[in-house]
Amino acid sequence: MTDSVLIIPQLRDRLRDYRPLQDRVDAAVLIPVTDEYVPHIILTRRASHMNSHAGEVAFPGGKRDSSDASIIATALRESREEIGLPEDRVEVIGELDSFVSKIGLRVQPIIGMVEPGQLLVPNPEEIESIFRVPVEYFLTEKVSYTHRFRFMGQDVTVPSFNYGDYVIWGLTAFMIVDLMKRAYDHNIEFEWPALVVNALEKK
């Protein structure tokens, strides 16, 4: 397990030179990490009245807009709109490979450092609540495999984490698992099902 004091330096070091596959992407999310001795990942719970992913845990983000200068700009704009995080208060330190959502969107995760005391306000039209989870939690907590969803007509088992009243699963959990493996060599035993891998390759 990575020492707490090394979590941020190692994250920066591992992402500094990593270049994700350059594919067409439809949307982006920001994975905000607080820059402090015990760093936390900031997540949201989507509002229950949303048409899609209602009540689910997610990172701030959304579809790319024609006015966005880049996919990073998409992630930053959506974070400002959803949780009130100003673009100039985020230090982007890297990206992960994109993921295909269950509705077929290719989503790019952007990693950004945020000051721990940054005021965040959920947009009630989209977000029910904002919460933080210690990075170390994902390095020590056992992953559950009890959640499933339909993908291309088949049932797919996905990783999930239970944190208080929140269940972190689906695409959000996939991204967290990928980040923990890439940044910290975390031995999370999980592989994407072949049908998901094939869908990614065809996108």
Image (spheres, rainbow, N blue to C red):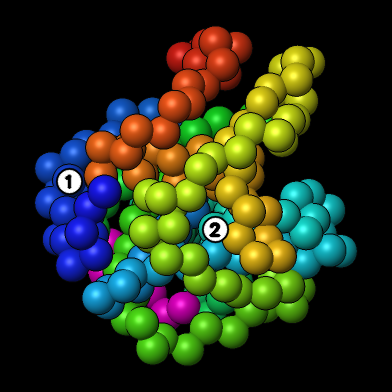
Disc 2 residue type?
Phe
In the image, is 162 to the left or to the right of 18? right
Q: Position of residue 142 (x, y in %)?
A: 51, 43
Q: Residue at x 19, y 39 (%)?
A: 18
Give, as a single range, the part of the protein colored magenta.
85-92
53 above or below 134?
above
Disc 1 residue type?
Arg
Foreground of the two, 101 or 42: 42
Marker disc for residue 14:
1
In whole angstroms, how far apart are the C-alphas of marks 2 and 1? 21 Å
In the image, is 147 to the left or to the right of 75? right
Q: Position of residue 37 (x, y in %)?
A: 25, 75
Q: Residue at x 32, y 39 (%)?
A: 186
Q: Nearer the viewer, mark 2 or mark 1?
A: 1
Residue 134 falls in image quadrant? bottom left
197 above or below 67?
above
Marker disc for residue 2:
none
Q: Position of residue 1 (x, y in %)?
A: 26, 48
Furthest-right residue in this view: 49
The residue that mark 2 highlights is 59
In the image, is 114 to the left or to the right of 128? left
Instruction: Determine whether the residue tagged by mark 2 lies in a helix, strand or loop.
Output: loop
Residue 150 falls in image quadrant? top right
Near mark 2 (Cα within 10 A), the count class, few <14, some 14-19 or many ≥20, is: many
Q: Residue at x 38, y 49 (%)?
A: 139
